[in-house]
Amino acid sequence: MSAAVATISVALGNRSYDVLIGAGLMADAPALIEARLGKARCGIVTDANVARRQLAPLEASLKAAGRHAGTEVLAPGEATKSFASLARLCERLLEMGLERGDLVIALGGGVIGDLVGLAASLVRRGLRFVQMPTTLLAQVDSSVGGKTGINMAQGKNLVGTFHQPSLVLADTDSLATLPARELRAGYVEAAKYGLLADAAYFAWLEQNVSAVLERNAAALTHAIAVAVQGKADVVARDETETGDRMLLNLGHTFGHALEAWAGYSDRLLHGEAVAIGICLAFRLSEELGLVGNNSMARVETHFAGIGLPTRIADIAGGPPPDAATLLKIMGQDKKVRGGKLTLILARGIGEAFISRDVDPSAVLDFLARQAGR
Ligand SMILES: NC(=O)c1ccc[n+]([C@@H]2O[C@H](COP(=O)([O-])OP(=O)(O)OC[C@H]3O[C@@H](n4cnc5c(N)ncnc54)[C@H](O)[C@@H]3O)[C@@H](O)[C@H]2O)c1
């Protein structure tokens, strides 16, 4: 493993862009941006946690280059992905005088990336934006692929657009200050790529998980680069999720239901919900006779070994959800088409597929048994 910078290209015709992954990228941000996107003025948007730790050097280097248009610091947390914050942010971007051709930099985790992407897609009918993800979840997943969104009373991410970033700079050094629980939760989205389509990568993660979670730069760079390459390939084939991109939802239909039931709170982080969701998808696949060879046990051992929840009963802080409630929430998920549940199931590690033919009553029965465990 070398600690060199990895470059992944997301091939989307005239909206193609590079994802750079490695240590020390933040310090070079103005030059890296200029080399690819020209001498644009940049407005930075971040949250208060990230601002405290990572904002000053970026702001200083943009100011030194004469390209700083302004900085907006938002409250951290999922509640920031709201219509009210979107409206305020659009106003702030206009106040910064950003014009077509200028750039918005989203410096933060998936909350900042999703909100800033949406604002950038709307202001002046579309500003370019640069993702500078500072959580592992955002580096392996949400900063790439162009999905933007905010939450509504009816559910998460229900209002949004597809707006691809013009560049992604994933500096592994920025993960140094990320709480360990957030790092582990983000790791699940990396492991997901191995589990859905790349058995060799999952085997590599099994060998190298300690180095990744100890934030070794070379291990992180490799882990992030392979996951991003996996996502880039899927997004290039199916940008707007009409087919293959749905595979990326492995563990998410169950996971989103658990997250919604837990009230999107600290009780269960997104990645933790997805860890349980992936285990449920493999367990259901095993029950349906689709997957053999102990794949389920391997997945569960891997996640449990690093302290992630793998069962509904692992959700601390109160009684478990009942199956009917979970199924009802799953029925409201965006992955429902024509009243049928779309589940991502597996035939093995690295062999996920889209299934629309599992009977909802079988899923209810399965969840009732799982929730009781
Ligand atoms: N667009 C997509 O394709 C996509 C994919 C997956 C998830 N998401 C979205 O991403 C969001 C979750 O993202 P997240 O897990 O990054 O959450 P987040 O943005 O809320 O970040 C988690 C916490 O870590 C803090 N933080 C961020 N970087 C830090 C750092 N370097 N040091 C210290 N603290 C830091 C944040 O302030 C926050 O408190 C959800 O809203 C989800 O819907 C989007």
Image (tube, rainbow, N blue to C red):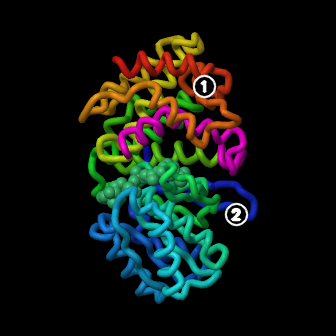
**Residue 212 visible to an observer of this rendering:** no
Callout 2: helix, strand or loop? Answer: helix
Indicate whether 357 appears above or below 243: above
* Mark closer to the chain start, 1 or 2: 2
Percent of width and height locating residue 320: 33, 28
Residue 284 got which mark?
A: none
Q: Report helix, strand or loop for mark 1.
A: loop
Query: Residue 53's x, y, as percent?
Result: 28, 67
**Left or right: residue 52 compared with residue 85:** left
Which amino acid type corresponds to the residue marked 1 in the rendered image? Glu
- In the picture provided, is 91 more to the left or to the right than 352? left
Quadrant of picture, ligand 1? bottom left
Q: Is residue 247 magenta?
A: yes
Q: What stretch is highlighted in magenta?
A: 234-263
**Residue at point 43% right, 66% down?**
107
Disc 1 crowd rating (10 Å Cα; few below 14, some 14-19, many 20+) is some
Query: Could you say which is closer to the camera, residue 324 or residue 206?
Result: 324
- Asked whether the viewer can see residue 355, the reply is yes
Tell me what residue is drawn at x 50 percent, y 50 percent: 156
For the residue pair 222 and 42, the one nearer the viewer reads as 42
**Label placed on residue 351:** 1
Classify residue 100 by image quadrant. bottom right
Q: Name the residue under label 2.
A: 15
| Three-letter amino acid code at the position of disc 2 | Arg
Look at the image and tell me in which quarter the C terminus lies.
top left
Q: Which quadrant of the structure image shows residue 125?
A: bottom right
Residue 282 in the image: state x and y as whole percent. Answer: 50, 22
